[in-house]
Image: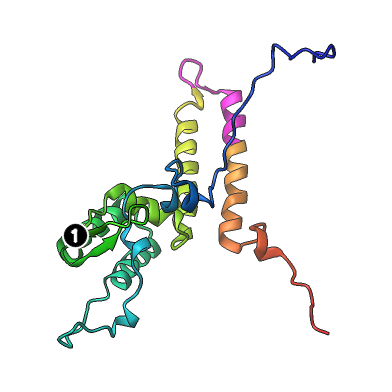
Amino acid sequence: MDYDGDEDVNSVMVRSEPMYNVSTWRTNESNGKQCSQAREDCFLCSHRPDNGGNAVDENGDPIPDYYTMIVHIIQTLASEGSEVATIVNTVYSMYEDNVREDVVTKNPISGMIINKPEWTKSSIERHILYSGMCPELHDDMVDKIFHGIIDMHNQHLIDADKKRLIEDERKAFMDTIKHYGAWSRIRRTGVGAGKSTRVKKNTSI
């Protein structure tokens, strides 16, 4: 540290920004993982359920509730443990084949009306992972990361020449198993998962 009043020549200035920017409506920035921080159209962000499936057109014919249909298929596949890529491909095909032809949306920045907007796979993935509609998918992702780490440990546990455990690898493997066990308990019981363990204060008078 320089105590002479001069700037420390070893200091590094870091320009920081929020991990989750709640003010993109004002800045129109495109620098994050959430739909609000992207410039791609998102069908589920720009539309809402059509009156519980009871909406009708000017001729009295029922209007398909595409929003609810898509949300249902996403949540069903997520509950079955499908991988994100499988869900994204399924939703993309459903939108392209059955929905896009009837969609009209407005660009939130320019205000321009867009007919038959593209809903890209990257936009679908972004909404599925970061909208909060399927929190179990993030938990599944953590599981898969642990599985990958464990598999990698397994590839390097044995000294091929001496036919003995490599001690550093064994310790790293056991450390991973310890943390995976703790993570699994959180998933299974909710204990240690933040608000699930908090005791509500009695606010009654």
Give whichever of 82, 104 is nearer the camera: 104
Of the residues shown, which amino acid type is indicated by label 1? Answer: Lys
Give whichever of 166, 14 is nearer the camera: 14
Residue 165 on image: x %, y %: 55, 25
- In the image, taking residue 117 as reference, residue 140 lies left or right, namely right
Q: Tell me which corner region of the image, top left, top right, bottom left or bottom right, holds residue 68.
A: bottom left
Report crowding for label 1: few under 14, some 14 to 19, many 20 or more residues within 10 A (C-alpha).
Answer: few
Residue 193 on image: x %, y %: 63, 58
Above or below residue 116? Residue 5 is above
Above or below residue 39? Residue 197 is below
Mark 1, secondary structure of its residue? loop
Boundaries of the magenta span: 159-174
Q: How many marks?
A: 1
Residue 20 on image: x %, y %: 54, 47
Q: Quadrant of the C terminus?
A: bottom right
Residue 179 on image: x %, y %: 61, 44
- In the image, taking residue 147 as reference, residue 58 lies left or right, namely left
Give whichever of 25, 179 is nearer the camera: 25
What residue appears at the point 29 percent right and 71 percent down from the top-left corner?
Answer: 69
Circle 1 residue: 116
- In the image, taking residue 193 as reference, residue 155 lies left or right, namely left
- In the image, taking residue 96 as reference, residue 156 lies left or right, namely right
